[in-house]
Image (spheres, rainbow, N blue to C red):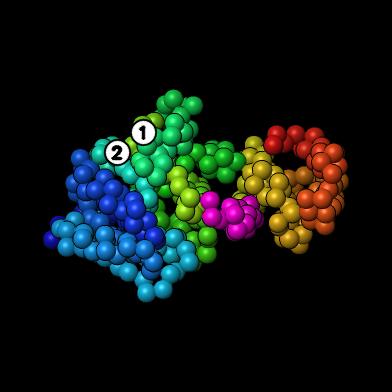
Amino acid sequence: MKTPKVSIIIPNYNHAQFLEERIESVLNQTYQDFEIILLDDSSTDNSLEILSRYESHPKVSHFEVNQQNSGSVFKQWVKGIKLAKGEFIWIAESDDVAHSKFLEETSFFLNQNTEFALVFCYSIEIDNKSLETGKILGPIKEKKDFIISGKRLVAKNLISKLVIGNASSVLFRKSAFKYVDFDRLIKFNNTGDRYTYITMGLNSPLYYLNKPLNFYRNHSQNTTKKNNLNNSIFYDRISIVNEMIPILKNDKKAKQFLLEFYFKSVFKHLDVVPISINQNLVVKFRKNNYFDKSTSFRILFYNRVIFLFKKRLPHKLRVFYKNLIFNRLKVDI
């Protein structure tokens, strides 16, 4: 049997409502040199009934069902990657939809540019009924293709802000996963995709294709929404910050981008982040010369005040303490 060029991993958990549309959008790609790996993480809806209809399809090489829920979509990523035979990998999330030319456009780029770890496009948001909401995910303000390469651009585009708005909008080169620590990846609840992009971007260039080839579905059971509600997303972001502090310390601008991410994604939520965790981060920032001792003291003091008073601290005092820190660092939050 001929080895497929692309391995398409569809990791599913309770997305029966969207599964048929997702799978059909994959099968109807204009580029057809691919295999499909169907993974179900012990769904409790009628997902298996729908997935079983495709089990014998000639494009489906694997249909794997977990008897117990793994608790992490990234465990499913790793499972699928290890099963994949293709040179390229597309993790097609089970609630999204693809433009028919997604694979044609992205695989052509990776074929022609062997030094790139991945290529991604921008996404159009759709709702439960597959109607466009008018929202776009991705760096469309750039209005042109661009490259992400080196610490500064990685920090700007993947840390301070994340220009890759949806994992389904990415085609990976399988060999680039050699940079990713799978044991670490499976510990993430939500930010494993960002960790993957950052790790690859620090080792190989990434490419943005300025085309709308992906449709991201926004709905009530979206994983990111749930992780925002249970606060687990903040711990994933803390893990990213903790790892990046020593890596970016020698680039002034990259350091600033990391600080922006810290203040926007962690510092704003100190009432749910334990004092000790933030204290360790601040100490690490200080040791790696991100700010001086005085600023470090101010941040730790504000941390303690916010955590002790939670939402009861008067707004004017919150603003006062923030200004003491942010005006000194010139961080725009």
How many residues crowd mark 1 within 10 Å: few (<14), some (14–19), many (20+)? many
Q: Is residue 228 magenta?
A: yes
Q: Amino acid at mark 1?
A: Pro
Give yes or no for contact between labels 2 and 1 (Cβ–Cβ under 8 Å).
yes
Residue in view at x 56 percent, y 56 percent: 227
Q: Where 185 falls versus 129 (above or below)?
A: below
Instruction: Tell me which secondary structure the magenta stretch mostly adopts.
Output: helix
Query: Disc 2 marks which amino acid?
Result: His
Q: Position of residue 14 (x, y in %)?
A: 39, 60
Disc with the residue nearer the chain's start (2 vs 1): 2
Which residue is most to the top? 143
Answer left or right for 153 relative to 2. Answer: right
Q: Quick one: quadrant of the C terminus?
A: top right
Q: Residue at the location (26% across, 37% down)? A: 101
Say whether residue 300 is visible: no
Q: Position of residue 261 (x, y in %)?
A: 64, 44
Disc 2 crowd, CA 10 A, few/some/many (<14, 14-19, 20+): some
- Residue tagged 1: 212
SS for dot 2: loop
Image location (x, y in percent) of residue 278: 73, 56
Residue behind mark 2: 99
The residue stretch that appears in magenta: 225-243
* Res 152 → quadrant: top right
At horizontal 62% and vertical 57% (from top left) the residue drawn is 231
| Residue 48 is a magenta residue | no
**Element under disc 1:** strand
Task: Tell me how far mark 2 sits from mark 1, CA to CA.
Answer: 8 Å
Which residue shows up at 70% across the image and 56% down it?
272
**Where, by quadrant of the figure, is residue 119 drawn?**
top left
Residue 45: x, y in percent? 36, 63
Which corner quadrant holds the N terminus? bottom left
Q: Is residue 129 visible?
A: yes
